[in-house]
């Protein structure tokens, strides 16, 4: 799984706001209308719509229109991109250990830590 | 090893003390933690049990990767373990263990990274921005108002 830094930035920015987290919480189990959300928050429809827009742009929220009603629902697996997969971690360490090996090997040729075994004639 | 952990094994052609040094001395850590030579890396550590470390990798494109944690076990030259947290990807309190074993003049390194966020237990250790991402998806699903 590879996610761009820009996408992660959008997700984190969207989450770094208490009302937007509360919106996500409220739409997690069932879809809700923008009007219902506005009622809960004691915010104007326009203000809620703004927050909803940020969440949609971050790919966290699904937004559907049915006639004049606007429904919001948490997108399934919306938060997966920010969680590291085991494969990501393996790739991370593999790359680091490659570098470690090359550092140790380079230094070994410059300044051998283990003396070479020499054949000696007695 | 189950799906919640990662294990990587390497045979390094140098003596065990030098491998241990590469993990314990900050100036050496900074040298091998960068994968691309255009990145810059800073590492600081207080190398004792309970001491903290911090590694900052600047990729030069605005992305700064930060990993931090504290040392749990230091048994020179065979064993080292430390907690591992990072902001991106959000991981908190995972544990990295390094086991070293001499094999002739070489050293076998086994790295085990445990309690990763692919499981519920791992997710419980996952953080996000302002701490709000902790187990957020699960929280959202379980605590949705009726």
Image (spheres, coloured by chain):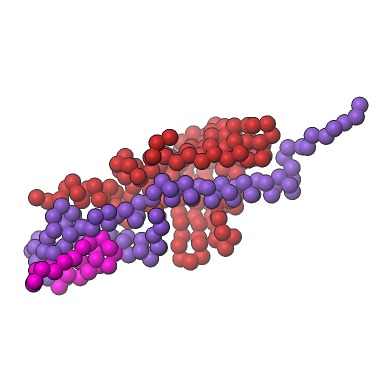
Q: Is residue B10 above or below residue A13?
A: above
Where residue A14 sits: x, y (%)? Answer: 28, 63
Where residue B34 sits: x, y (%)? Answer: 55, 55
- Quadrant in which residue A81 is drawn: bottom left
Q: How many marks?
A: 0
Where residue A6 sits: x, y (%)? Answer: 38, 66
Query: What are the residue bounds of the magenta stretch?
Result: A46-70
The answer to if B13 sits in the magenta stretch is no
Q: Nearer the viewer, residue A93 or B16?
A: A93
Q: Is residue B74 above or below residue A36?
A: above
Where residue B59 sits: x, y (%)? Answer: 50, 62
Q: Nearer the viewer, residue B16 or B6?
A: B6
The answer to if A56 sits in the magenta stretch is yes
In percent of the image, x 20 and y 57: which residue is there?
Answer: A74
Instruction: Residue lying at the far top in this picture: please name it.
Output: A122
Instruction: Residue lying at the far right in this picture: please name it.
Output: A122
Chain letter of the red region: B
The reply, left or right, for residue B2 in relation to residue A106 is: left
Instruction: Residue lying at the far front in this picture: please name it.
Output: A66
Q: Is residue B100 above or below residue A78?
A: above
The reply, left or right, for residue A49 in relation to residue B110 is: left
Chain A shade: purple
Q: Is residue B54 visible?
A: no
In percent of the image, x 16 and y 66: which residue is there?
Answer: A64
The reply, left or right, for residue A97 in relation to residue A12 is: right
In percent of the image, x 29 and y 52: which residue is there?
Answer: B133
């Amino acid at each position: 799984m590879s996610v761009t830094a820009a996408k992660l930035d959008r997700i984190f920015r969207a989450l770094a706001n208490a009302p937007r987290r509360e919106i996500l919480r409220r739409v997690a189990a069932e879809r809700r209308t923008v009007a219902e959300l506005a009622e809960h928050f004691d915010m104007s429809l326009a203000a809620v719509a703004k927050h909803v827009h940020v969440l949609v742009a971050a790919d966290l929220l699904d937004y559907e229109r049915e006639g004049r009603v606007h429904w919001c629902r948490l997108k399934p697996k919306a938060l997966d991109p920010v969680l590291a997969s085991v494969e990501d971690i393996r790739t991370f360490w593999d790359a680091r250990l490659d570098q470690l090996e090359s550092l140790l090997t380079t230094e070994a040729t410059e300044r051998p830590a283990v003396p070479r075994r020499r054949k000696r004639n007695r | 090893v189950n799906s919640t952990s990662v294990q990587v094994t390497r045979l390094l052609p140098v003596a065990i003390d030098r491998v241990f040094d590469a993990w314990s001395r900050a100036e050496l850590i900074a040298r091998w933690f960068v994968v691309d030579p255009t990145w810059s890396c800073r590492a600081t550590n207080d190398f004792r049990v309970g001491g903290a470390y911090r590694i900052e990798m600047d990729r030069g494109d605005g992305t700064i990767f930060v990993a931090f944690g504290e040392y749990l076990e230091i048994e020179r030259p065979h064993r080292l373990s430390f907690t591992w947290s990072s902001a991106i990807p959000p991981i908190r309190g995972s544990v990295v263990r390094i086991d070293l074993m001499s094999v002739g003049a070489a050293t076998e390194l086994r790295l085990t990274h445990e309690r990763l966020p692919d499981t519920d237990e791992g997710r419980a250790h996952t953080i996000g921005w302002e701490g709000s991402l902790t187990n957020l998806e699960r929280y959202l699903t379980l605590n949705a108002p009726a």
